[in-house]
């Protein structure tokens, strides 16, 4: 089992998504990320400076909301190396690392390979994308990230409570 | 009053001392004085008038008066200095009185010039006597005590007159001391004297008269005098009041003028305020327009800043929201004790890595303190891990959850502040626009307002100055008015004047009341007098043997003129035909006088000079009887020629005393009592 940092440096591990360029539903990354090829999506407001920023945020959002997507991860748009602390910042990297550590310690993942575990990780990412997509579609194709943040906090609390019940403390 | 004695010294023809006792004797009250013409009978009469009433003395039926120098005996005055006097002793109201009135004289020395006639000589003496005669004292003695008189001559005279009048009023004296020949004047039509007046004087209405007199005196001498004086003062007060009124009207006019000017001033003041408001508004509009420009600039700035902030926030959100979520997660996870071992492991590992790399995970260099702390954290059982917050901060570097939130909230607050600024500025701009829209004035209006404002201010100042002057003027005039009113108050006699007028009016009412009472008394007495006079007339005619003259009744008409009734018939005036003879008239008058004295309230002696003049002898007895029946003190003056009258003989039978006057010379008569 590769440790987190090693895994990120391994080219086999990429940012997988079902909502990228090959998506049959929407290339959500194209819609909300600045600097991407925005052909057909010029009118949409951009919220993220790069796709890896959206990937990281969506992962946190999906994980804290305990939402895993079942959408097939047909697009592998960037190397996982994009998530390291040099690129993302220490805090996000630490959080993602903790999520990874939680995923690999989950009993149901005990027998899975590392690549399978990474797929599980990316399912959380697409889960977050689905939350954003729903919000985006319901909010006149705009993202109120503050509202999303405020919405996810109680979900985070609930998840942590489930993860670590009080009586177990 | 009853006469007891009369003394005369150097008085008229009485040289030296002469006295006569008139006291009643054996119930007889008739005193007879006999003498030829010029012997001095009437001088006794004059002496009584003199002692009671002073000079000039009315004698001879008011045809002649005698002055003081006429009363001094000529023989005596030509001999030496001396005193002449008359003293009368009488009883009045049970009191014994004596009155003495003196005349002082100095000797006159005149030799008869042979060339002068007797008349010229007499006139010369008379003129000399005038120079050498002065009035002397009047002495009244009551029950042996001399009455004191005031030292002031005027008061003394008044007091003396008052005392005398109480005993025998001067006005009525002539009805007691009368000339037999003169009394027939009462029968003239109309009577020479008011018979009504005579009745009033003689009947018992003296108290009423005194009251009337007192009240009249009080009214005329005090109240009316005060009224006249106060009336003059009141005119002065009216003058002051008029002056005050004029001054008051001037003040009122000035105050009216002030009120008008104040109104005008107020008008200008409101104009000033209105125009100032216009000008201020214009000024405010200018300010508002300036403000709008500033607001526009601020709005643009705020818009730009907000847009920039929003963009920044979005950029931050995209990049940092992941961090924020991570931090929140880490914070929550770390707060769970069950996860402590894992957390500690993570921290320990992270701390070791940081030490190895020589920098914090936030890429900051580690200082010595940080290194020491990380060394502690890198130990698996480090106590430093107990302090989760510290450990967390080491892991998270500069980004604590609070720092993130603060940064984020700072953006949000900034945006919110910009939004509020924009809203506020927009609102203010809208309000200013609204004010500008509704209060705009043209530049012409503003210019006019500026000019009008200036003019109004000048007018306002002018009127303020004028009002100040008016205030001073009013103050001055108020002082003048106060002075005038003080004069009015000081001189105001309205109250005492009103009081005196009321008092005078009350006096007049009382006088009228007394007059009415007197009128009633006289009217009642009039009938009694008529009846008694009729009775006397009938007695006289009856005693004369029948009804020769037909005088049957005596009447007084409404004007108190005497009427007679002949036989049985209507009353007629004595001027009506058949006109009464002189004798009849005297009988009528005598009957009237006797009736008067009978009903007089106060007893007084009657002097009748020559009672039977003009009368036929046949009537003298009956008249004498009538007089005697009166039972009054009667002094009869008669001449020796009248001794033939039965009447005189009848008097002599009933006399108290009889005195005979003998003329020794022109200036020397003597009196002796005859038996």
Image (spheres, coloured by chain):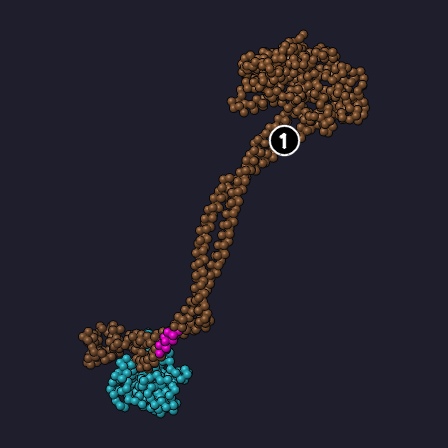
Chain colours: A cyan, B brown
Residue found at x 60% / y 28% = B214
* Residue at the spot of label 1: B511
Give the camera-side residue of B400 and A94: B400
Q: Is residue B673 above or below residue B567?
A: above
Q: Residue at x 31, y 86 (%)?
A: A50
Left or right: B447, with B64 as reference point: left
Judge by depth and name the residue closer to the eye, B120 or B108.
B120
Quick one: SS at disc 1? helix
The dominant secondary structure in magenta is: helix
The residue segment tinted magenta is B292-304
From the top left corner, tell me how far across and down residue B607 is, in percent.
67, 17
Q: Residues within 10 Å of mark 1 (few under 14, many from 20)?
A: many
Q: Quadrant of the N terminus of chain B?
A: top right
Q: Quadrant of residue B366?
A: bottom left
Q: Nearer the viewer, residue B305 or B596?
A: B596
The mark tally for this picture is 1
Is residue B124 inside the magenta stretch? no
Looking at the image, residue B511 sits to the left or right of residue B618; the answer is left
Give the quadrant of residue A79.
bottom left
Residue at the image position 45 percent from the left and 65 percent from the top: B452
Q: Which residue is rendered at x = 40% and y = 71% of the image?
A: B286
Query: Looking at the figure, which quarter contains the C terminus of chain B?
Result: top right
Q: Residue B670: tell me if it is visible.
A: yes
Q: How far across and how far down the image is residue B494, in percent?
A: 55, 39
């Amino acid at each position: 089992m590769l440790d987190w940092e090693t895994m990120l440096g391994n080219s086999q591990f990429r940012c997988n998504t079902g909502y990228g360029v090959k998506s049959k539903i929407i290339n959500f990354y194209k819609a909300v990320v600045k600097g991407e090829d925005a052909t057909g999506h010029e009118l949409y407001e951009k919220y993220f400076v790069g796709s890896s920023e959206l990937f990281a945020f969506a992962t946190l959002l999906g994980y804290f909301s305990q939402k895993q997507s079942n959408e097939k991860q047909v697009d592998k748009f960037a190397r996982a190396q994009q998530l390291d602390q040099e690129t993302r910042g220490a805090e996000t990297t630490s959080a993602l690392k903790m999520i990874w550590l939680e995923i690999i310690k989950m009993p149901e993942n005990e027998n899975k390979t590392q690549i399978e575990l990474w797929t599980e990780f990316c399912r959380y990412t697409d889960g977050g994308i689905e939350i954003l997509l729903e919000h985006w579609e319901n909010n006149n194709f705009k993202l109120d990230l503050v509202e999303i943040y405020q919405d996810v906090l109680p979900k985070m609390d609930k998840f942590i409570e489930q993860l670590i019940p009080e009586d177990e403390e | 009053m009853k006469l007891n004695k009369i003394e005369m010294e150097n008085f008229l023809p009485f040289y030296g001392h002469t006295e006569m006792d008139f006291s009643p004797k054996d119930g007889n009250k008739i005193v007879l004085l006999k003498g030829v013409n010029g012997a001095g009978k009437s001088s006794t009469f004059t002496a009584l008038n003199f002692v009671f009433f002073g000079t000039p003395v009315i004698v001879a039926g008011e045809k002649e008066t005698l002055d003081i120098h006429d009363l001094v005996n000529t023989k005596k005055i030509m001999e030496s200095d001396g005193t002449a006097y008359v003293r009368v002793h009488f009883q009045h109201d049970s009191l014994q009185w004596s009155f003495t009135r003196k005349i002082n004289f100095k000797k006159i020395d005149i030799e008869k010039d042979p060339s002068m006639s007797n008349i010229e000589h007499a006139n010369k003496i008379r003129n000399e006597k005038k120079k050498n005669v002065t009035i002397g004292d009047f002495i009244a003695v009551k029950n042996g005590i001399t009455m004191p008189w005031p030292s002031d001559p005027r008061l003394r005279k008044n007091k003396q007159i008052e005392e005398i009048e109480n005993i025998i009023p001067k006005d009525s004296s002539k009805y007691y001391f009368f000339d037999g020949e003169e009394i027939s004047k009462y029968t003239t039509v109309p009577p020479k004297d008011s018979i009504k007046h005579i009745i009033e004087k003689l009947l018992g209405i003296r108290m009423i008269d005194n009251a009337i007199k007192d009240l009249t005196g009080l009214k005329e001498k005090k109240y009316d005098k005060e009224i006249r004086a106060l009336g003059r003062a009141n005119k002065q007060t009216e003058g002051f009041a008029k002056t005050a009124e004029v001054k008051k009207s001037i003040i009122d006019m000035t105050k009216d003028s002030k009120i008008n000017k104040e109104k005008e001033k107020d008008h200008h003041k409101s104009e000033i305020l209105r125009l100032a408001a216009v000008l201020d508004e214009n000024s405010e509009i200018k300010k508002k327009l300036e403000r709008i420009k500033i607001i526009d600039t601020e709005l643009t700035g705020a818009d730009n800043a907000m847009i920039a902030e929003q963009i920044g926030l979005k950029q931050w959100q995209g990049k940092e929201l992941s961090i924020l979520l991570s931090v929140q997660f880490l914070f929550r996870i770390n707060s769970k004790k069950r996860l402590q071992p894992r957390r500690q492991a993570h921290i320990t590992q992270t701390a070791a890595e940081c030490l190895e790399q020589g920098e914090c995970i936030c890429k900051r260099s580690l200082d010595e303190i940080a290194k020491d702390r990380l060394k502690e954290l890198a130990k698996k059982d480090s106590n430093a891990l107990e302090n989760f917050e510290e450990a967390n901060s080491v892991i998270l570097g500069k980004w604590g959850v609070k720092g993130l939130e603060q940064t984020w909230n700072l953006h949000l607050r900034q945006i919110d502040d910009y939004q509020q600024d924009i809203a506020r500025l927009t609102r203010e701009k809208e309000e200013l626009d609204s004010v500008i829209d509704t209060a705009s004035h043209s530049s012409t209006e503003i210019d006019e307002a500026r000019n009008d404002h200036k003019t109004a201010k000048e007018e306002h100042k002018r009127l303020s100055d004028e009002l100040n002057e008016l205030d001073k003027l009013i103050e001055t005039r108020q002082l003048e008015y106060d002075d005038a009113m003080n004069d009015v108050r000081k001189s105001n006699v309205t109250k005492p004047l009103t009081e005196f007028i009321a008092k005078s009016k009350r006096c007049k009412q009382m006088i009228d009341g007394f007059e009415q009472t007197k009128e009633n008394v006289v009217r009642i007495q009039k009938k009694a007098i008529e009846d008694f006079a009729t009775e006397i007339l009938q007695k006289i005619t009856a005693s004369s043997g029948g009804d020769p003259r037909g005088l049957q009744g005596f009447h007084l008409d409404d004007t108190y003129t005497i009427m007679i009734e002949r036989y049985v018939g209507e009353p007629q005036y004595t001027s009506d035909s058949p006109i009464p003879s002189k004798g009849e008239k005297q009988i009528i008058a005598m009957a009237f006088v006797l009736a008067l004295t009978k009903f007089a309230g106060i007893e007084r002696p009657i002097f009748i000079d020559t009672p039977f003049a003009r009368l036929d002898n046949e009537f003298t007895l009956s008249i004498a009887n009538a007089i005697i029946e009166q039972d009054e003190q009667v002094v009869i003056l008669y001449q020796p020629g009248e001794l033939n009258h039965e009447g005189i003989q009848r008097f002599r039978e009933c006399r108290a005393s009889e005195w005979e006057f003998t003329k020794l010379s022109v200036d020397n008569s003597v009196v002796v009592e005859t038996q």
